[in-house]
Image (cartoon, rainbow, N blue to C red):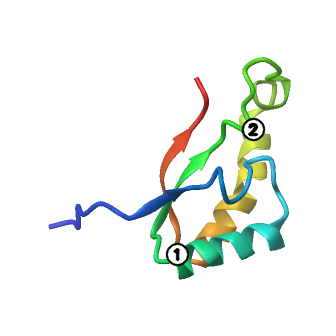
Amino acid sequence: MENSSLKISVQTGGIFRATTNDREFLEEKFKLISESGFEAVDYNIDHFVNFKNNDYFWNKEIDELIEYFSVTKGAADKYNVGFSEVNPKV
């Protein structure tokens, strides 16, 4: 049977903004998250997706978004931190 337990997670909004794509900075933050006992994050993309000025996010090709967010995913993977949610502002 697969492990169906909930992971303990924390929102990223107070730790870093989704508009940050600096690998060293992100690794530092995911290390802090991991060392603090969190297994996952609720990734706040509301700083990135601004519905009043949404040109950056919505006008990108999927390949560009995958490339951009792969830096964040790589930093999270390095410290075994998963993603439990992705939260935009609605």
Please tell me which residue is depicted at 77% across the width and 32% down the height of the picture.
Answer: 61
As drawn, the label of residue 80 is 1
Q: Sequence-wise, which precedes: disc 2 or disc 1?
A: 2
Question: Mark 2 highlights which residue?
Answer: 48
Q: Position of residue 41 (x, y in %)?
A: 52, 58
Question: From the viewer's perspective, is residue 41 above or below residue 34?
Answer: above
Instruction: Between residue 1 and residue 50, name the one nearer to us.
Output: 50
Which residue sits at x=53%, y=69%? 81
Check disc 2 and report its element: helix, strand or loop.
loop
Q: Quadrant of the C terminus?
A: top right
What residue appears at the point 52 percent right and 75 percent down from the top-left corner? 80
Looking at the rendered structure, the kind of residue marked 1 is Asn
Q: Please name whichever residue, 13 or 82, is drawn nearer the observer in this view of the structure.
A: 13
Please state if 1 lies on the left or on the right of 82 as rendered.
left
Q: Secondary structure at mark 1?
A: loop
Tell me the number on the disc at residue 41: none
Q: Residue furthest left?
A: 1
Is residue 78 depicted above or below 74 in this figure?
Answer: below
Q: Nearer the viewer, residue 85 or 61?
A: 85
Alpha carbons under labels 2 and 1: distance apart: 23 Å
Relative horizontal placement of residue 43, taking residue 56 as reference (left or right): left
Q: Amino acid at mark 2?
A: Phe
Vertical arrangement, residue 68 with respect to residue 46, above or below: below
Q: State which mark lies toward you, 2 or 1.
A: 2
